[in-house]
Image: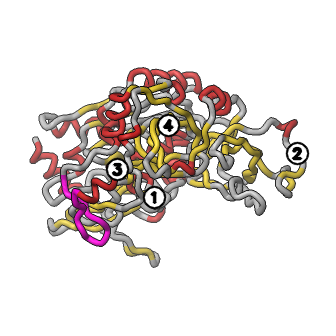
Amino acid sequence: MHRSIIALSITLGVAFSAPMHAEGWQSDVIGVTQSQLSPSYWLAKGGSAKMIMTEAQIAAFNEKLIKDNKYIVDPLSFQKSLTKDELTSAIHSASSIPKSPRFFTDGRQLTAKDFAKYQANLNLNKVADSNEVRFAVVVKRTALRTFPTWDRVLNSGLDQDLDRFQESGMFPGEAVAVLHQSADKKWLLVRAYNYLAWTPAEDLAFADADKIKAYREQDNFLVVTGAKVNTAYVPSDESLSEVQLDMGVRLPLVDNEQVPYLLNGQNSYASHVVQLPTRDEQGKLVIKAAMISKTADVNLGYLDYNEQNLIKQGFKFLGERYGWGHDYNGRDCTGFVGEIYKSFGLLMPRNSGQQGSSEYGKNSRFDKNTAADDKLSTVKNMAIGDLIYIPGHVMMYLGEHHGEPYVIHDVKGLGYNKGDGSFYSSALNGVSVTPLLPLRLSQETSYLDRVYNIKRIR
């Protein structure tokens, strides 16, 4: 069975057109033409505007996810205090010493002394018998880290792009439960809706959970639907000026009757005016009015969840540099699909293994005993937006070209077997459109071989 899938994949790889060298454009990406790098190409081939889930159904989906999925929580419903054992366990869960060697970017291997320094900053000796949980709002795009440090740490491959202390990212308006503070007081251990890790203290603003809840759950809100949008420049207030807002960020709008004609010296008539979270000198939450151009890629409320919008949203990231754990001011494969689905209001776990193994949605699961024909039959019947999982990676289905499935994904490597049977290895390192079946992890192993789940969000 395994051999038959490999043989089929090799055949398909040969059948695909060679890398493109036409009209002054050249590429080593197999089976992709310039026209396929436009959402209009895929929209013309298919993609329904029919609503997949209503707003009420999405709210129910999220509520069930928070209730049933161990990877997702409502941070504002987090318990008000932690025992010594509970907090110590949380710290060790977020900041365990890796079993395999780690290296600094200059190639020097981390020693026990290096890890002792990181562990000292965990501030374990300040864990009390009872520890108050505080609550905060993210005020700028920020990082979630394994340890409370900005040190970049690599595995034995010394790939400079893969900082193994980088876990994820957070965005303005997100709520977190704050569990602990580092010894140097520069970092906070937080429970975000889908992750537990350390974040810079300067990027959070504290408030009561009830105040944050009231701020976040207003009915009149704006959602960022472009890859990145900035607030207007404000010369007198850095906290409001050109704040980056990534896809899926939700911010309450200022009520129309409360919008002044002039805001920060600029007429407001050509802008959406949002309630932006900022922090004062004491680190407390201060809500300020900020402007976003009415030409910016935003929506009043969430986008309709349909196939057309899935295609459009995915393509807004096309060409963005791959960023492991939201590094490089970008995102990785799960960040990519997570941000797309957040623009519809849908939540997901952070990592691909968590997503792929979870029971939410409609799942078509495969194991090593799955017949090749059974797997291909499922692949051939995918719907636009279906999520395809292999170990450590996720792709989103776009549609078919000449009967062959294509995907869009945020991916690091590029591999396929050439017409002469040799294995071609290079890099994509960004959001890319590719055919699915020719892609390979090695000369012997295709992506298709490793697909273990195809998930449909319903």
Q: Nearer the viewer, residue 433 or 235?
A: 235
Residue 353 in picture, x, y percent from top left: 30, 39
Label 3 SS: helix
Residue at horizontal 34 percent and vertical 45 percent from the top = 394
Q: Give the mark, 1 or 2, whose residue is nearer the N terminus.
A: 1
Residue beneath disc 4: 178
Label 2 SS: loop
* Labels 1 & 3 near each other (Cβ < 8 A): no
Q: Give the mark, 3 or 4, whose residue is nearer the N terminus.
A: 3
- From the viewer's perspective, is the residue at label 3 or at label 4 nearer? 3
Kindly tell me whether residue 26 is visible in this rendering. yes
The three-letter code of the residue at mark 2 reads Pro
Residue beneath disc 1: 36
Q: CA distance from mark 3 to mark 4?
A: 19 Å
Q: Nearer the viewer, residue 18 or 150?
A: 150
Q: For the magenta stretch, what is the residue range?
A: 100-112
Q: Give the mark, 3 or 2, whose residue is nearer the N terminus.
A: 3
How many discs appear? Answer: 4
Q: CA distance from mark 1 to mark 2?
A: 45 Å
Residue beneath disc 3: 120
The three-letter code of the residue at mark 4 reads Val
The three-letter code of the residue at mark 1 reads Gln
Residue beneath disc 2: 260
